[in-house]
Each structure stands twice: as C-alpha cells, then as structure tokens.
C-alpha cells in the first residue's frame, strides 16, 4: 500500500458547525486518527477546528478531503483545493480525492490538476471516489502518482467484491463510506445472529467485518459521542471465520447511494 491507513476513519458527511467540530474532537480523543471531509460537505472549517481543539498533533492525523464535481475543471481544481487548505487551516491534506467522476470531470484535465497538486505538496497522496474499474484503469494510466485510496459505499449488504479485489491487486485501499448501511441493514438476520453470538450490536459487527477485510477501511459518521466511541471500540471485536463467512454469504444486496449516479453508468 502507498499509504498505511488506520483500521477505521471518521466520516463527517452531514455534520456542520459546532456539532461537526465537537464530533471531530470527540473522535480524535477516542482514538481515531483518520478524518474524512469534502468540499461538498461544507464543513472543512469545522473539521479543521475540531482537529485543533482535540490537541492531537496534526502530523498524527490522516486528513482527507475531496474536490467537488463542479470544481473538477483544471483551473478550478487547483484553486479550490488550495481554498480547502485555507478552510481546514493546514498546509496539506494527506489524501485528496476526485469526489465523483461527474460534473466538470474530464480525465486528462482533472487528473492533471490532481497530479500537479500532489507535486506541489497540496496533497500528499491522490485518491478517487465512486469510480468503476474502467475509470480506475483510465486514471492509473494518466496519473504518475499512485492512487492511494478509492472511496466507495461498502457494507455487508453492498460488499464491493470486485473493487476490493481490484484494490488488492493494484495496491490501494478501499475506504468504505456508509459502513453501517445508515442503520437500514441492522435487521439483516445474519448480522443479528453474529451480534447475538458476541453479545454486541449489528453496528459493531459491521465495523468488525470491514476491519477483517484486506485493504478495506470503514469511515462511519456520527455526532453522538457514545456512537463515536462505540464505533472505534468495535475495531477490537474479533469475529470468527464462521462469522465472516456468514456475513460474506448474505445474498441480499442493497445500495444506499443513488444507483443512477453517472459514475456507475459509464
């Protein structure tokens, strides 16, 4: 792997203002060392404030942001990524993603901007989000820098076997958003059975399942301090091989992000 990510990250989608800053501080105090934001989330100032409030050294935090699809033109990508640094109050981000290959995304121009942002030190590593295997192949051909991460929806009911296998083959990490299936998957019998066996919750099982997988890092999101702490504690839950096999064998598939998104129709 070109970037060694922690077992779990902290997602911030949907959180803004003081709630977001407090959540990031709580997460870092609880032991998270990977924080994910995006221009789209409109919370980069709060994320930066939360990191500073925590007292955790900036160098000990893997900080990721993403370029808004409408900002993926060459000049806009360069300018708005530097604006992201200003909003975050940092000199560089550790991961900079193409958020969706839609909007103003043009592979040659958008990825040239991403490569230059890496070369200029704005982004220590480059990454993509919501790509198909064909789009990943194209990006790898254009970029000089290695793709460090690919962020996609990933949870026990949307396991992304193909993209996880692709990541293992090409040496990057899959960062899984919606790892708890937004709570909509907790009544799945297989998850409930494993949770009962370990006297824990389906949410904890979802996190533990992701941690068991090669090159997969979940990034659950919450502003509830108890949930934030419970999610990071779930990384210590040891599932048996039978538990993992039971979850792997779930036949139901449920995607929560809009399946009509253009990235999945190219």
Image (cartoon, rainbow, N blue to C red):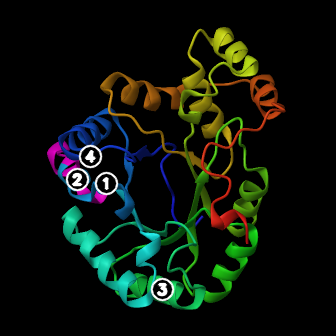
Quarter containing the C terminus: bottom right
Residue located farthest toward the front when viewing the structure as drawn: 260
Q: Secondary structure at mark 3?
A: helix
* Alpha carbons under labels 4 and 3: distance apart: 29 Å
Residue receiving disc 4: 16
Quarter containing the N terminus: bottom right
Pinpoint residue 261: horizontal percent, then vertical percent: 63, 60
* Alpha carbons under labels 2 and 3: distance apart: 27 Å
Pinpoint residue 211: horizontal percent, then vertical percent: 60, 39
* Alpha carbons under labels 1 and 2: distance apart: 5 Å
Residue receiving disc 2: 57
Q: Which mark is in front, 4 or 3?
A: 4
**Magenta residues, as a range?**
50-61
Q: Nearer the viewer, residue 264 or 83?
A: 264
* Alpha carbons under labels 1 and 3: distance apart: 24 Å
Q: Is residue 264 magenta?
A: no
Instruction: Name the quadrant containing residue 159.
Output: top right
Instruction: Name the quadrant containing residue 88.
Output: bottom left
Q: Residues within 10 Å of mark 3 (few under 14, many from 20)?
A: some
Residue depicted at 63% across the width and 25% down the height: 238
Name the chief secondary structure element in magenta: helix
Tag 1 and tag 4, C-beta contact below 8 Å = no
Tag 1 and tag 2, C-beta contact below 8 Å = yes
Tag 4 and tag 3, C-beta contact below 8 Å = no
Which of the two discs, 1 and 3, labels the residue nearer the N terminus?
A: 1
């Amino acid at each position: 792997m070109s970037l060694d990510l922690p077992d779990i990250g902290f997602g911030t989608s949907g959180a803004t203002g003081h709630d977001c800053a407090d959540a990031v501080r709580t997460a870092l105090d609880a032991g998270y060392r990977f924080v994910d934001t995006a221009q789209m989330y409109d919370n980069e100032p709060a994320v930066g404030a939360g990191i500073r409030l925590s007292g955790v050294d900036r160098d000990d935090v893997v900080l990721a942001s993403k370029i808004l699809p409408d900002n993926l033109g060459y000049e806009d990508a360069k300018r708005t990524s530097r604006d992201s640094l200003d909003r975050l109050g940092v000199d560089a981000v550790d991961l900079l993603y193409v958020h969706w290959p839609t909007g103003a995304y043009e592979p040659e121009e958008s990825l040239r901007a991403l490569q230059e942002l890496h070369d200029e030190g704005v982004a220590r590593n480059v990454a993509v989000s919501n790509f198909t295997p064909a789009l990943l192949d194209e990006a790898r051909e254009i970029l000089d820098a290695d793709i460090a991460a690919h962020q996609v929806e990933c949870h026990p009911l949307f396991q992304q076997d193909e993209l996880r296998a692709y990541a293992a083959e090409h040496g990057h990490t899959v960062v899984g958003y919606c790892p708890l299936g937004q709570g909509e998957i907790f009544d799945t019998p297989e998850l409930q059975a494993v949770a009962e066996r370990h006297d824990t919750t389906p949410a904890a099982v979802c996190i533990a399942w992701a941690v068991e997988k090669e090159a997969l890092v979940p990034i659950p999101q919450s502003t509830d301090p108890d949930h934030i702490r419970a999610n990071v504690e779930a990384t210590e839950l040891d599932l048996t091989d039978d538990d993992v096999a039971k979850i792997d064998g779930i036949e139901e598939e449920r995607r929560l992000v809009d399946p009509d998104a253009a990235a999945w129709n190219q």
